[in-house]
Image (tube, helix red, strand yellow):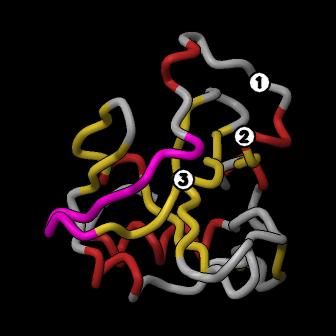
Amino acid sequence: MVHKPDGHERTAHPAAEPKLVKFSDSGFDLEDPNQVLRGLDVYGSDGKEIGTVEDFYVDSEDRKVRFLDVGAGGLLGIGEKHFLIPVEAVANVYEDGVTVDQSREKVTGSPPFDTSVVPQADYLRDIYHYYGYGRA
C-alpha cells in the first residue's frame, strides 16, 4: 500500500512491478533456437552441480529473460526443490551446461521458491538482494 498525502491508502500502480511470465507458459519464441537453456545442468562458481534449468521467467513487457528456475534433488520430480537465479548470475553457457557466479551452497540457501505462483515484486527484490545484485 502507498499512503497518499491526504492520509488515505491506495495500492501501488501495477506498472511499477515487473510482469513476469514463465517461459513455458508464455507462447514466446526464442530469437535463436540455440539459446534454449532448459534441460541444461547448472554449476556453481565452486564447480559443484546445483541442478537443472527447468524453465525461466521472462519480463512480458520487454521480453527479456530475468530468472532461471533451477530444479535440484528429488526423484522423478518428487521432493525436488526449485531455486530462482537472476540471469545476471550466469557466468558461462556452454553446450551441456550453465555456470553461475554463485556457489552451490549460496544457491541452495536462497529463499524458498514456489513454482505454482509467479514471483511477485517483494520476492524478486529479496532474491536480487540475496545474490548481491542492486536491481529489482
Q: Which element carries disc 3, helix, strand or loop?
A: strand
Residue 126 higher or lower than 94, as above or below? below
Please state the extent of the stretch shown in magenta in the rendering.
38-48
Q: Which element carries disc 2, helix, strand or loop?
A: helix
The disc, 3 or 2, on the residue closer to the chain's N-terminal end is 2
Q: Name the residue beneath numbered marker 2.
A: 23
Q: Which element carries disc 1, helix, strand or loop?
A: loop
Q: Magenta span: helix, strand or loop, mainly?
A: loop
Q: Which of labels 3 and 2 is toward the front?
A: 3
* Left or right of 24, for residue 91: left
* Left or right of 54, for residue 51: left
Q: Nearer the viewer, residue 37 or 8?
A: 37
Residue 39 higher or lower than 76, as above or below? above
Q: Name the residue beneath numbered marker 1.
A: 28
Task: Give the image quarter of residue 92.
Answer: top left
Mark 1 touches mark 2? (CB < 8 Å): yes
Q: Position of residue 106 (x, y in %)?
A: 29, 81
Point out which mark residue 106 bears.
Answer: none
